[in-house]
Image (cartoon, rainbow, N blue to C red):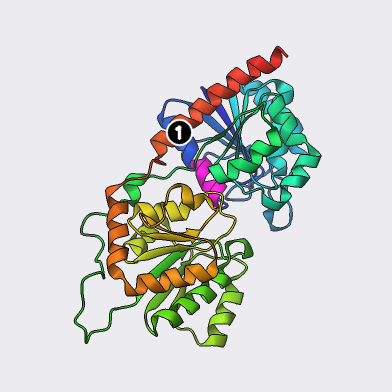
């Protein structure tokens, strides 16, 4: 099968959709399929206007124009995209979309006009914007014309099902990870759960998270709630490492300086191999986001054995069961209390860590890539049905 992956953002930009699209392409090729990527993201050396830059053997069509901050937007792209898709002999298009994805949406209009079977995966929580999408009506129309709709989690799929209506199915196509890469060796993690003499204070519970330091991910709120947890559990009971970069870094640093907090570290963004090492040296992963459609970093941490503490209503709840592989809590106050409790009860931390190590998640790439191929087959079948309406 020859697949066209359409995405506003792609490497060298770094983010969830970018990395997932790259990894999906690699695993589709491993299954024997042919893949080309079409994006509005400039290349690593600023390549624009349709230049093709191979990334790990995958041709990437850079349908980008020069814009401030290299914004992945190009209203001139549809004509050239149409020409390349027509000439390329593709069997199916797979569109990756978020709440605002102008290139992907333009691409969907092109693929529908061409009669090219189209699968579309939503990587976002529609939330408060869902009524606007309902009024605009384009998502409903795309589904009616045969676009095979999917979302990365059940919670992300729910509002999408409301938009498309009962006549069209919305499946769950989760994000994937390389489970073997994230599984630690049995001796890699030195637990702090062993009993301590009554006169010896337990070392701090080592909390960790990996996120973009942006308002939607709530890094400042995380620091505030962990500070509350530390007050509840006792001074020196917790430490926190926040991995990542973003516009909220200064706000977080200012809060730490103002309140004299020295037990939070901000090492910045780190490569995957170092991230795995840091997970092996931590005790608990914390995910404070309220609008997390999936939670790739949380899944990687859970695969590495870390109990995950996350907010209810996010995609994390689909691979973390409360009080089994972590804790799912309703709000920040309960999260603070839960973290304080774990700082005191290290045996509970060890029990959840052991369960995570003994039970691999199902979102391994071979499984996810097979689900993607099933979506392509569904899109092809839907196109045949739509053409006979």
Q: Is residue 237 above or below residue 332?
A: below
Q: Quadrant of residue 362?
A: top left
Q: Where in the figure is residue 46, as x and y percent of width and height?
A: 63, 50
State yes or no: residue 20 in magenta.
yes
Viewer-closest of 18 and 154: 154
Q: How many marks?
A: 1
Residue appearing at x 39%, y 77% in the figure? 238
Q: Where in the figure is residue 134, as x and y percent of width and height?
A: 76, 40
Q: Where in the figure is residue 334, as x and y percent of width and height?
A: 50, 68
Q: Where in the figure is residue 164, as x and y percent of width and height?
A: 69, 33
State yes or no: residue 218 in magenta.
no
Can residue 118 be seen at all in this image of the molecule?
yes
Residue appearing at x 52%, y 56% in the figure? 312
Q: Quadrant of residue 239?
A: bottom left
- Residue indicated by mark 1: 369
Q: Residue furthest right?
A: 135
Q: Label 1 neighbourhood size at 10 Å, few (<14), some (14-19), many (20+)?
A: many
Q: Is residue 152 above or below residue 70?
A: above
Please identify the dominant SS of the magenta region: helix
Q: Which residues are magenta?
A: 14-22
Considering the image in quadrants, where does the C terminus appear?
A: top right
Viewer-closest of 345 and 254: 345
Can residue 62 be seen at all in this image of the molecule?
no
Q: Secondary structure at mark 1?
A: helix
Q: Is residue 325 left or right of residue 255?
A: left
Q: Residue furthest top?
A: 388
Q: Is residue 122 above or below residue 229?
A: above
Q: Is residue 103 left or right of residue 221?
A: right
Q: Is residue 190 above or below residue 170?
A: below
């Amino acid at each position: 099968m020859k697949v066209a992956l359409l995405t506003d953002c792609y490497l060298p930009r770094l983010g969830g959709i970018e990395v997932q699209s790259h990894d999906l392409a690699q695993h589709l090729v491993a299954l024997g399929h042919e893949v080309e990527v079409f994006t509005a993201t400039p290349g690593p050396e600023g390549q624009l206007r349709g230049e093709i830059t191979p990334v790990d053997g995958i041709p990437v069509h850079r349908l980008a124009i020069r814009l401030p901050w290299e914004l992945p937007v190009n209203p001139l792209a549809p004509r050239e995209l149409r020409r390349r898709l027509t000439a390329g002999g593709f069997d199916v298009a797979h569109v990756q979309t978020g709440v605002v994805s102008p290139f992907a949406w333009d691409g969907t209009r092109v693929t529908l006009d061409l009669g090219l079977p189209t699968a579309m995966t939503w990587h976002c929580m529609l939330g408060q914007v869902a009524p606007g999408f309902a009024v605009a009506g384009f998502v409903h129309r795309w589904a009616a014309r045969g676009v095979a709709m999917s979302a990365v989690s059940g919670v992300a799929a729910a509002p999408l099902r409301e938009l498309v209506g009962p006549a069209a199915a919305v499946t769950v196509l989760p994000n994937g990870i390389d489970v073997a890469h994230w599984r630690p060796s049995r001796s890699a993690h030195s637990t702090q759960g062993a009993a301590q003499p009554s006169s010896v204070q337990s070392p701090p519970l080592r909390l960790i998270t990996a996120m973009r330091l942006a308002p939607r991910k709530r890094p400042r709120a995380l620091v505030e709630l962990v500070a509350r947890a530390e007050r509840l559990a006792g001074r020196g009971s917790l430490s926190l490492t926040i991995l990542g970069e973003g516009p909220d870094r200064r706000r977080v640093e200012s809060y730490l300086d103002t309140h004299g907090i020295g037990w939070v570290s901000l090492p910045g963004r780190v490569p995957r191999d170092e991230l795995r090492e840091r997970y092996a040296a931590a005790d608990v992963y914390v995910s404070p986001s309220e609008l997390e459609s999936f939670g790739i970093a949380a899944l990687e941490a859970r695969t590495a054995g870390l109990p995950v503490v996350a907010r209810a209503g996010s995609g994390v709840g689909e691979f973390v069961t409360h009080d089994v592989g972590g804790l799912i809590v309703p709000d920040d106050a309960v999260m603070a209390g839960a973290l304080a409790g774990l700082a005191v009860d290290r045996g509970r931390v060890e029990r959840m860590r052991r369960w995570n190590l003994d039970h691999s998640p199902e979102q391994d790439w071979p499984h996810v890539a097979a689900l993607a191929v099933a979506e392509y087959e569904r899109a092809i079948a839907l196109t045949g049905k739509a053409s006979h309406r």
